[in-house]
Amino acid sequence: MSIEATVSAALTLENFNAHQAAQMNLLRETLDHQARTVTEIVESATPRLATSGHLGTNINTYA
């Protein structure tokens, strides 16, 4: 293999690795965003318990 071909292969591999790293970062950001969205949805669907009054402060009873 010639020097030119070796350098070309090395540069191609370096560019490929940079592209893969960028894609991995994008995937991580997307998954983090989805996790935050799901967490917000689950938290908003969770019923809030009463904090004052006679009903619902001693026993958690909801259907």
Image (cartoon, rainbow, N blue to C red):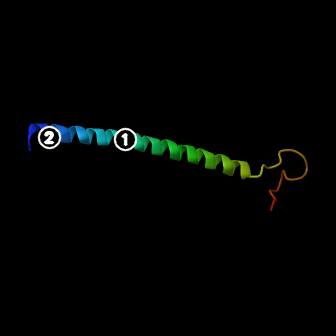
Residue 12 quadrant: top left
Vertical comparison of 63 with 30: above or below: below
Q: Quick one: quadrant of the N terminus?
A: top left
Q: Against 22, is 58 above or below?
A: below
In this view, 21 is above or below 61 = above
Question: Residue placed farthest to the left in the image?
Answer: 2
Amino acid type at circle 2 is Thr
Q: Is residue 20 left or right of residue 11?
A: right
The disc at residue 12 is none
Task: Sort mark 2 into few (<14), some (14-19) or many (20+) by Cα contacts within 10 Å.
Answer: few
Q: Are marks 1 and 2 in contact (CB under 8 Å)?
A: no
Which residue is at the front of the view, 31 or 53? 31
The mark that comes first in sequence, 1 or 2, is: 2
- In whole angstroms, how far apart are the C-alphas of marks 1 and 2? 22 Å
Query: How many numbered marks appear?
Result: 2
Which residue is under mark 1? 21
Query: SS at mark 2?
Result: helix
Q: What residue is shown at x 73% (from left), y 52% (from top)? A: 45
Give the x, y percent position of residue 49: 79, 50
Residue 22 placement: quadrant: top left
Mark 2, residue position: 6
Vertical position of residue 45 compared to residue 20: above or below: below
The residue under label 1 is which amino acid type? Ala
Question: In percent of the image, x 19 and y 42: which residue is there?
Answer: 9
Seen from the viewer's position, the closer of residues 51 and 44 is 44
27 or 55: nearer the viewer: 27
| Residue at the right extreme of this rendering | 54
Q: Residues within 10 Å of mark 1 (few under 14, many from 20)?
A: few
**Residue at the image point whose x is 30% and y is 42% from the top:** 16
Tell me the residue at 90%/46% (across/down). 53
Residue 51 drawn at (x, y percent):
83, 45
